[in-house]
Image (spheres, rainbow, N blue to C red):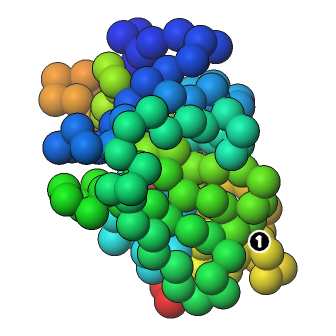
Amino acid sequence: MGDGLPDASRTLTGGCHCGAVRFEVDLIGGWQAARRCTCSFCRMRGAVALTSAPDRFRILAGAEQLTEYRFNTGVARHHFCRHCGIYTHHRRRSNPDELGVNAACLDGVSPFDFAEVPITDGVNHSSDGGPVGPVGWISVRWAGDQETAATTATTSATAPRPSAP
């Protein structure tokens, strides 16, 4: 994880791009719970999701500015600001008692702060008998960082790839 990340054991604040929605959250699993997903929706939005729970996520302002999107089974509930369109959080299909929180919406956090993020197989979803746990990893490599470049090349070459939809 990046050295500049806030202390994940404390209550964190965040919001959407335009500021209409503000929230606070207590994470479960800290920064190590970060993940990305290969389902058709997550693949297009590209967010790094962190883990929380409904009783650990509190909307401070703009609840009425959130809109919801559901698809496929309708279990996952994805929330977005109706003004700027930024995805803030979602109720997970894999565990409806958990929320996924967009890391990029947290104050002082960027998805590029995570050197490596596990990928879950959302195409062959675990709720449908697909694999549980990571099926690969996505890495950030900054120009001029040769040590990371060598590690990334090795990890990328050996990571299993989920089948295309």
x 78%, y 54%: residue: 97
Element type where label 1 sits in the image: helix
Q: How far across and down, in percent of the image, does residue 84 sit?
A: 19, 56
| Residue 89 vertical placement versus 33 (above, below) | below
Residue under label 1: 126
Residue in the picture at 45% in, 33% down? 60
Which image quadrant is residue 105 in?
top left
Instruction: Tell which residue pokes out farthest to the right in this image.
Output: 129
Front residue of 99/151: it is 99
Q: Residue furthest front?
A: 64
Q: Position of residue 139 (x, y in %)?
A: 40, 41
Whether residue 141 is visible here, answered yes or no, is yes
Give whichever of 5, 119 is nearer the camera: 5
In the image, residue 89 above or below residue 140: below
Q: In terms of depth relative to the viewer, which is nearer, 59 or 136?
A: 59
Q: Quadrant of residue 76?
A: bottom right
Place of residue 164 in the rendered image (x, y in percent of width and height, measured from the top left): 49, 85
Residue under the image location 49 percent in, 21 percent down: 12
The residue drawn where x is 59% and y is 12% is 10
Image height of 62 relative to 124, above or below:
above
Amino acid marked by disc 1: Ser
Q: Position of residue 131 (x, y in %)?
A: 77, 69
